């Protein structure tokens, strides 16, 4: 590594990715320092993290928590701000070397745009940003010469497989999917599954929204769209394969037919560390994979008829324009409603499909179009949900 530590802004530090990123940073004080922490509403954890890592600035989005955070951190000389607007402005601070986008959902879009405008390299966990506005984000990043390093394990795997292959075209990528907790279930069985069952992922411990997305396979759908933008692929170049052991994190097939895979135990700390430390592989004590403990790694087709969200995401990718933005917003609202027991598991797809049919298509959206599409979709989706409860 270089002599001075890389100063990282962690957006969404109190979540699953955020807390693991802090573990990675604390394990390598010579390589990394925390410059900014932001959180939505968990003031207690944000304060604890700031006391431990001594950032320059913290932002709490929930303005009602400002006094609590200020009273705890101001005596330590840590600057405290509140509100979503503050997140979008602190990412431009001169002292930041890299921005890790680890907040969940559409809220990631504006701060990511602002960070790219300020030429901050992005370690991107917040896949929703690329789903909503992949065209805008990748164009802006290219204009500003800003790299986007993937944190999502599948995309990190592809990125790692592409090291040293910059001039070799990709024939296709193979995104692996665990299949989630409901792999193999029929639609009839899915009609009665509970949120508690959906929240039990077999291989990964993650935030609630992405865990439900993994159960519906929407997570893989979002990742297909994310991959298109990160690696400049056509839909035909992206294949999804269910691999229940989650050991192969994804693969790249080149034009000579050779396939490269990146493997390891499922542990998000590795892709987080690879993105934060790129291009260096930093020595770690993460548990090692043992082939003899996994005598069979298996692969199967995803079931697009049962798990309709994945098909809806493929359709959105084909239609382009503001359709992925519609799918994302409808999914966020529907997942929230499922988590509040307002709708059943299968109705998540119904809400998304209805929104894609009802909201006006925009072929080449600009930022304001995305904002409007997101708002309108949320309104329509909530209306649909109210009419069924
Ligand atoms: P999480 O729910 O555990 O944490 C979300 C974080 O974002 C929290 O710090 C929260 O305070 C903050 N946040 C929530 N809403 C916000 C808002 N409106 N404005 C600002 N901040 C807000 O989520 P997670 O599992 O850590 O996932 C974060 C992102 O990383 C998601 O986009 C997810 O798809 C992606 N991701 C997560 C994993 C994983 O293993 N958890 C893997 C790959 C990708
Ligand atoms: Mg993933």
Image (cartoon, rainbow, N blue to C red):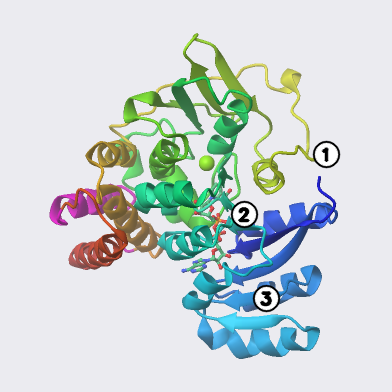
Q: Is mark 2 within 8 Å of ligand 1?
A: yes
Q: Does the magenta stretch include residue 210?
A: no
| Foreground disc of the pair 1, 2 | 1
Q: Compare marks 3 and 1 and give the one earlier in the sequence.
A: 3
Counting from the top left corner in percent of width and height, residue 279 is at: 70, 39
User: Between 138 and 377, which is closer to the camera in this rendering?
Assistant: 138
Q: Residue furthest top?
A: 256
Q: Is mark 1 on a helix, strand or loop?
A: loop
What kind of element bears circle 3? strand
Which residue is identified by label 1?
A: 283
- Which region of the structure is painted magenta? 342-360
Q: Where is residue 380 in the image (x, y as percent from the top left)?
A: 20, 64
User: Spatial distance from mark 3 to mark 1, Cα to Cα?
Assistant: 29 Å
Residue 29, compared with residue 48, is above or below; it is above
Label disc, if present, on residue 112 of the rendered structure: none
Q: Where is residue 322 in the image (x, y as percent from the top left)?
A: 25, 51
């Amino acid at each position: 590594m270089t002599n001075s530590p890389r100063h990282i802004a962690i957006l969404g530090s109190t979540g699953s990715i955020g807390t693991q990123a802090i573990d990675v940073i604390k394990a390598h004080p010579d390589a990394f320092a925390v410059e900014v922490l932001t959180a939505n509403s968990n003031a207690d954890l944000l304060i604890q993290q700031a006391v431990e890592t001594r950032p320059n600035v913290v932002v709490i989005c929930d303005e009602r928590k400002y006094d609590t955070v200020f009273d705890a951190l101001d005596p330590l000389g840590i600057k405290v701000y509140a509100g979503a607007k503050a997140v979008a402005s602190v990412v431009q601070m001169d002292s930041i070397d890299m921005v890790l986008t680890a907040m969940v959902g559409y809220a990631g879009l504006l701060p990511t745009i602002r960070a790219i405008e300020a030429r901050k390299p992005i370690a991107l966990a917040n896949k929703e940003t690329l789903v909503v506005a992949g065209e805008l984000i990748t164009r802006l990043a290219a204009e500003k010469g800003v790299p986007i390093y993937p944190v999502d394990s599948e995309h990190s795997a592809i990125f790692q497989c592409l090291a040293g292959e910059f001039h070799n075209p990709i024939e296709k990528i193979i995104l692996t999917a665990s299949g989630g907790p409901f792999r193999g279930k029929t639609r009839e069985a899915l009609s009665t599954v509970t949120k508690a069952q959906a929240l039990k992922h077999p291989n990964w411990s993650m935030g609630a929204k992405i865990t439900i997305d993994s159960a519906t396979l929407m997570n893989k759908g979002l990742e297909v769209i994310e991959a298109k933008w990160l690696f400049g692929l056509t839909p035909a170049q992206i294949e999804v394969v269910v691999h229940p052991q989650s050991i192969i994190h994804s693969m790249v097939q080149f034009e000579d037919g050779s396939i490269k895979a990146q493997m390891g135990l499922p542990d998000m700390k590795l892709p987080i560390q690879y993105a934060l430390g790129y291009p260096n592989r930093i020595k770690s004590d993460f548990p090692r994979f043992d082939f003899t403990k996994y005598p069979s790694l298996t692969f199967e087709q995803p079931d697009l008829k049962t798990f309709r969200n994945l098909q809806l995401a493929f359709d959105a990718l084909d239609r382009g324009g503001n359709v992925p933005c519609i799918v994302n917003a409808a999914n966020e609202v529907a997942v929230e409603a499922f988590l509040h027991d307002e709708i059943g598991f299968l109705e998540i797809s119904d809400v998304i499909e209805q929104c894609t049919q009802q909201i006006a298509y925009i072929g080449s959206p600009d930022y304001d179009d995305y904002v409007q599409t997101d708002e309108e979709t949320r309104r329509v989706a909530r209306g649909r949900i109210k009419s069924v409860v």
